[in-house]
Image (cartoon, grey):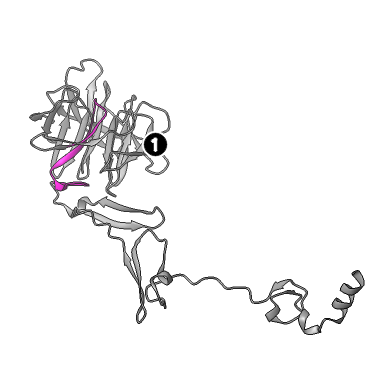
Amino acid sequence: MRVFLAILIATAPVTMACGSRTRLLVEPPDGSAATADAPGPTPAVEAGSPCTGDADCAVTAFCVASATCDPTSGCILVPRSCDDGVDCTQDECSEAARRCKNTPSDSLCPATQLCSATRGCDAFVYAVASDGHLYEARVPSGDLVDLGTPAAGVSDLALGSNGVLYATDSYVLSSVDRATAKTTTIASMLPLHLYNGLGTANDGLLATADVPQVFGIGAIDGSSTALASLPYGYRASGDVTALGARVFVSVASTGDPSTDTLVEVNLAAGDSTIIGDFGYRCVWGLATLGVVVYGLTCDGRILTIDATTGSATQIASAAPAFFGAAGR
């Protein structure tokens, strides 16, 4: 039997051992291995790709809602609609994230309003409260729109000019989804002071802490830099806000903390000046909307604040104790 097999192999025609149609592994002249007639890559399906049926146009892209074949014009790809029906949000489909992104754009609203991710342009400021919820606090009515519960311990907010709502739990900087209140950690805020206020000015993040200073906070890495000192005998009581180029902090006297005081911070000089007493205690939230500075207190009051004198006027009262606020 072995002799018979040997004869077959020896007498087999040479043409059976070579040639592309046999699809056998052959040795190219340069000595590298190759497979004859190896299939090439499958071309990506695009709008207008040649097709004979819908199967030729099948795609797995998230941002393609449907794909059908027109034998004459080729594949017809219909993009996914990410329109959320809110006029002031910028809608886009993210293939990388495989989801729709609907980003509030406050610039599409009047100066006296913000863009609610669910309701559109409205007059409100963001607020976090003792019940752990994030609210849109409508002004001047004081009506609250509950957005949900952010990460535990969020004590203050800041609304960046980029539309990002920032939050801190005193040690960690996070971003907050303006539609769902979901938080995403950005970085630790160093050094580890107990930060009790967060705000924005000149397109940068500012914070106050358990020491009488105002800090600049890195929006990417959470780094902390001392920028200005507060008046002697005062400590930050809760928040930072800006009105145009002016930067304000709510402070309390270390000697008589019965009512809080408005202080203006000069970032260029690194110091601050007392403007005047609010006439209300624990003004832990400051937020600017248009040309009005609002104050939110630990006993649920919503105030308007005279930026010239510091005096405050109550315009509404809400149920929760407010910890912090944000506007633009």
- Give the quarter of the figure containing the C terminus: top left
**In this orientation, which residue lies closer to the viewer: 88 or 253?**
88
Relative placement, left or right, of 44 versus 154 is right
**In this orientation, which residue lies closer to the viewer: 101 or 280?**
101
Q: Which residues are magenta?
A: 113-136
- Give the quarter of the figure containing the N terminus: bottom right
Instruction: Determine if residue 309 is in view.
Output: no
Q: Check disc 1 and give the amino acid type.
A: Thr
Examine the residues drawn in magenta and state their main secondary structure: strand
Picture residue at 33% right of the left edge, 24% below the top? 210
Q: Residues within 10 Å of mark 1 (few under 14, many from 20)?
A: some
Picture residue at 83% right of the left edge, 81% below the top? 12
Instruction: Determine if residue 106 is in view.
Output: yes
**In this orientation, which residue lies closer to the viewer: 161 or 167?**
167
**In this orientation, which residue lies closer to the viewer: 81 or 10?**
10
- The quadrant where residue 155 appears: top left
Relative placement, left or right, of 25 versus 268 is right
- The quadrant where residue 239 appears: top left
Question: Looking at the picture, how far across and down is residue 117, in whole percent?
Answer: 22, 47
Queried whether the magenta region covers residue 267, the answer comes back as no
Picture residue at 11% right of the left edge, 38% below the top? 139
